[in-house]
Amino acid sequence: MKKSVVFSYMLVVSALLLMFSLPNEQACAATETKTFNVRDFGAKGDGETADTAAFQKTLDTCAVSGGGQVIVPEGRYLIGSVQIGYQTILKLEPNSVIIGSSDPNDYPMVDIRWEGRWQPGRRGLIYASNVDHIGIIGPGRIEGNPRVAAPQNPRGAVVLEPVNCNDVRWEDFTVTQGGNWATHPTYCTDVVIKNVTIEGRRDGIDVDSCRNVIIEGCNIDTGDDCISLKSGRGMNGARIGKPTENVVIRDCTLRGRIFAGIGIGSETSGGVRNVRIERCKFTCRTFAIYIKTRIGRAGVTENIHGEDIDVLSGGFLRINLTRGGNTNTKDDPVEGLLGYPSAANLSFSSVRLHDATEIVRAVEVAPEKPVQGLSLTNITGTAVKGMNLMHVRDLALKDINVTGFDGPLLTAEDVTGTGLN
């Protein structure tokens, strides 16, 4: 595909994504006519009394009444897992704090998507399933409990987890979590996450087989990937074939203390495509953008475009299609050449490096499935290492003005394209 075609295609995708944000505003405007206060349903907000039943009764009454806002006034509310219903917006007023219970029995066992497969696990602190027009708006705070989050098999409780929902809006609140992913939209469509602050020791936002997603103005500080785009693992994910697609990540500040700012993978078996990353700042231990998967997981990562990016720490871009991602649960591989992941139409421009550890590392690529199309334009600043590429077709390098590195600016093996000089 020619660059002009790719660019035009991405502009169309961006325009469509802007349109997808409108239903959230319209849905919320429609629901603001009815309000339901958790205090009126018995919530104490003293940080000691269990308010789970009061919260669930308020949420249920709102949904059954046709929707509206569930108001959480100032206070500290101790709850276990609750479930949001149809056309319900959870409104966290100033100085309101939701605190997750430390008792695992307060989080029912349900089927959840974990590490790319469906399996039993603890239900999220604030959970929704098969409902439309839902949201959480701030400026309050939600604190997940590390004790119930940490277990891996079965999976512990994440903080926010909508599953198979349409029109999901999160805006202007703070989430804290330790020991597990903080938020995990799964099989959702038309998702807007705006001005949300996330602090934790694992992933901040895991977008799992979702369509039409906007992540905007978020401040994420985590001990794992700040944002991860996923679509299933191995044969299970490939068989289901639900991609993550049409994603815009813009105006975000991302700090990955251990891993990446934006991880694409490592579960990509259903495919990840049509992703725009704009005006973001990265401070990461590994790489700002890390495309990672492994042989046996199949899937295509394609049409990934980044522009106007600041890399304040760590490397800029890594592409690992052969051995990326953990194996702490048993793989269910796609055998043979079908199981080799592929990547195509990756383009990045206007990237500013501030003493980056590395510009690009793309050497974990199988010769049987080379990267098809990688464009790097207007890359400036300073870096310790240059670009190391292997098995790439249709490479396009232009206006690479980086200083401070040791060794060659470009090391290439089995690479074709323009700008190699």
Image (tube, rainbow, N blue to C red):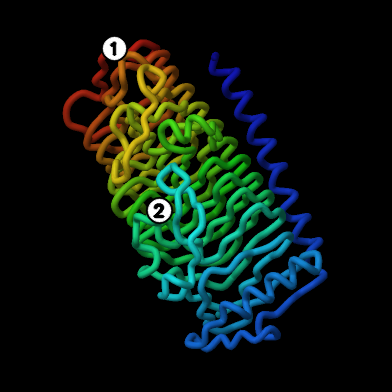
**Residue 40 visible in the shown view:** yes
Q: Which residue does the numbered mark 2 point to in the structure image? A: 203
Q: Nearer the viewer, residue 82 or 70?
A: 82
Image quarter where the C terminus lies is: top left
**Residue 380 visible in the shown view:** no
Does residue 35 appear left or right of residue 329 in this picture?
Answer: right
Measure the alpha-carbon separation of dots 1 and 2: 35 Å
Q: Nearer the viewer, residue 181 or 41?
A: 41
Q: Residue at x 46, y 38 (%)?
A: 232
Residue 133 against residue 100 in the figure, above or below: above
Disc number for residue 109? none
Does residue 122 appear left or right of residue 340 in this picture?
Answer: right
Q: Measuring from the top left, give residue 144's x and y in whole percent.
A: 45, 68
Q: Residue at x 67, y 29 (%)?
A: 12
Q: Residue at x 34, y 48 (%)?
A: 312
For discs 1 and 2, the disc positioned in front in the rendered view: 2
Q: Residues within 10 Å of mark 2 (few under 14, many from 20)?
A: many
Q: Which residue does the numbered mark 1 point to in the structure image? A: 414
Q: Measuring from the top left, give residue 82's x and y in whole percent.
A: 58, 69
Residue 172 against residue 401 in the figure, above or below: below
**Amino acid carrying mark 2 in the image:** Asp
Which of pointers 1 and 2 lies earlier in the amino acid sequence?
A: 2
